[in-house]
Amino acid sequence: MKYETQKVAYAFFLVAMGLFALQLVFGIMAALVYVFPDFLAQLMPFNIIRVSHTNLLIVWLLIGFMGCTYYLMPEEAEREIHSPMLAYLQLGIFVVAGVAALVCYQLGIHEGREFLEQPFFVKVLITVSFLIFLYNTSMTLLKGRKTTINLVLMLGLWLAAVFWLFAFYNPGNLAVDKVYWWWVVHLWVEGVWELIMASLLGYLLIKMSGVDREVIEKWLYVIVGLSLFSGLLGTGHHYYWIGTPGYWQAIGSIFSTLEVIPFFAMVVFAFVMFWKGSRNHPNKAAMLWTMGCPTVAFFGAGVWGFMHTLSFINYYSHGTQVTAAHGHLAFYGAYVMLILGVITYAMPQLRRSQPFNQVLNMWGFWILTSAMCFMTFTLTFAGAVQTHLQRVLGMNYMEVQDQLGLFYTMRLGTGIAVTVGAVLLLYALFGPARRSASGQPAMSAS
């Protein structure tokens, strides 16, 4: 670890992983309801379990992005973080906001908009925390070295903050509401978050592949351009059936098809860089996560997104388990694996030790990834059956759900496997580090 203030990232990683574990608990609870419909019905209804599961995902990913930024920014800017105290303050505010939102959901207090259910005061706290974060990191950047990595990263983070402001706009007209609702939900995960993803991936490749920074930065410009070009108008695939003009069906179909390209470019980017690289980096587990991230993201976000993004297919498949299949693998591949990769790379240096528990970490990788892929296949088949029975044959919703019991049982099994993989991974990251012959933690080179 070259800069002392990089240790700020450790607190963010610790909180993010704690919320990740809690998200998995709510995920298992939701999966149990699909198999045993009366499970916790009186104590905690399914809608509360689901909103807790999805909101925890968003919150821990954001905290993870912040931790990754605080870790890489000093190295990229070649200076210490502007104010570590502000970093800890904004983390505290964000955690308070997240806990308050979770408590409010259990009490039935929310705004009712999917993913944006947070009560108004929670949204204000999140905004304050984000502004402190942006001020702190932007001041660090302004006073230090500017690179393509940190400039693209900060562009993505600032745009995420700008589009978050539409979460405060809650019009009475449902069609208008959905138009602007997607400006947060879609333009985050399929727009500006891709800039964050590309910059963090580029940082890992620079550190571990040994390829010249200039080569990686050229690839990064191409990926960013493709992401913005396809992602912005790709919003149209959410405008098919919400009361917007018919031309969105053509725009959405065309640009959503193009959204596959930046994810494919990231796969080629990662593999070509490692193929060209000359450095045999000791952190093999971090290399595995770095290579796995764009690969799984290409299938989850790219291929599975394309499978039901064309309007004449989406007419039948929207709102079915096909959407759930796409969502689970896309989030896991693009963002969960990325943050886990950065944490795997950073933790040995934050703990001032050689890469530790790598075999256990890689077991966590393969169990998590295999289980998520199997869950995606299970939900895909469930969605295909649901689409045919419900949308083609006209069976009612509950009759169709009775036919999907086997798939839901299999999904519960994969959820348990995901949890097992996560437990192994968390122990690998935060458990005892390997020690040298003297009994002291072995120091690590960056």
Image (tube, grey):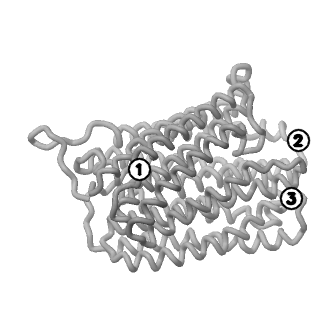
The residue located at (58%, 32%) in the rendering is 99
**Residues packed near mark 3 inside 10 Å, few (<14), some (14 to 19) or many (20 plus):** some
Can you tell which mark lies on residue 396? 2
Q: Position of residue 366 (x, y in %)?
A: 43, 50
Q: Which residue is mark 1?
A: 83
Give the amino acid at mark 1. Answer: Ser
Q: Which mark sits nearer the N-terminus, 2 or 3?
A: 3
Q: Position of residue 363 (x, y in %)?
A: 38, 46
Q: Residue at x 34, y 47 (%)?
A: 7
Q: Amino acid at mark 2?
A: Asn
Which residue matches tag 3?
A: 241
Above or below, comparing residue 76 to residue 14 in the picture: below
Q: CA distance from mark 2 to mark 1?
A: 58 Å
Question: Which badge, 3 or 1, comes first in the chain's sequence?
Answer: 1
Element assignment for label 1 = loop
The answer to whether residue 307 of the structure is visible from this angle is yes
- Residue 71 point in image, percent of width and height: 39, 54
Residue at the location (61% across, 58% down)? 160
| Along the viewing direction, whichever of 74 and 85 lies nearer the viewer | 85
The residues tagged by marks 3 and 1 sit, at their Cα atoms, a distance apart of: 47 Å
Q: In the rendered view, does 141 fall on the left or right side of 322? A: left
Disc 2 crowd, CA 10 A, few/some/many (<14, 14-19, 20+): few
Residue type for callout 3: Trp
**Numbered label attached to residue 222:** none
Q: Quadrant of residue 430?
A: top left
